[in-house]
Image (spheres, rainbow, N blue to C red):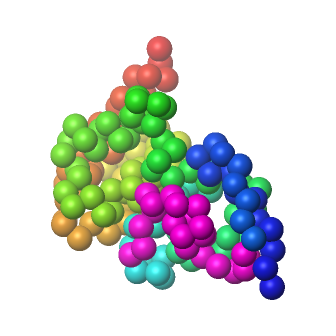
Amino acid sequence: MDATITLIVNGQKRTVVTDPERPLLEVLREDLGVMGPKYGCGEGRCGACTVLMGGQRALSCVTPVGSANDKEITTIEGLADGDRLHPVQKAFLDEGAIQCGYCTPGMILSAVALLEENRRPTDEQIVEWMNGNICRCNGYAKILNAVRRAASQIKEVKRS
């Protein structure tokens, strides 16, 4: 049975009438035209569909849209501030941590969630946190460098 679901996607209130058990990923892409989150495995194992829901990392392919009702959803499209990239986005570019780009939105959002929780992660903590995101191009060294760089830049911004 369909329900009216309200999502706040990248700062904009959006309403859909749909089955509340439908995957959030499907609603974002098919109903709302938000293409940043990618379909990877459909089982919550690859991280390509990662979004932030209420500031927390969520795997949108296995998250029922009903559980996102009235929650803030941030996708890669909502990270930048106008033309100014989020520090994690900039670090990924600066470190060349983008190869084919398929995993990149999920990787970046996972890194943002990590740095919101832990501003000074060790390499081991970064690897453990990012373990749920798969890069088919095997760009893990550059991704680790990018998260390290973003952590240092975010620390610098917070001090000033």
**50 shown above or below 80:** below
Against 128, residue 156 (above or below) is above
Whether 67 is drawn above or below 122: the answer is below
Reply yes or no: does residue 122 show up in magenta.
no
Q: Is residue 29 visible?
A: yes
The N terminus lies in which quarter of the figure? Answer: bottom right
Indicate whether residue 28 is drawn in magenta.
yes
Q: Nearer the viewer, residue 32 or 62?
A: 32
Q: Would residue 64 appear left or right of 42 to someone viewing this image?
A: right
Examine the rendered structure and indicate whether residue 136 appears above or below residue 69.
below
- The residue depicted at 39 percent of the width and 75 percent of the height is 40
Residue at x-position 66% and y-position 75%:
64
Give the percent coordinates (x, y) of residue 129: 42, 59
Q: Position of residue 102 (x, y in %)?
A: 30, 63
Q: Answer left or right for 34 relative to 2.
A: left
Magenta residues span 18-40
Q: Residue at x 32, y 36 (%)?
A: 90
> Mostly what secondary structure, the magenta segment?
loop
- Give me the residue at 18% from left, 66% from top: 137
Query: Nearest the camera: 63 or 27?
Result: 27
Residue 118 can be seen, yes or no: no
Q: Nearer the viewer, residue 16 or 58?
A: 16
Residue 51 image position (x, y, % from top left): 52, 58
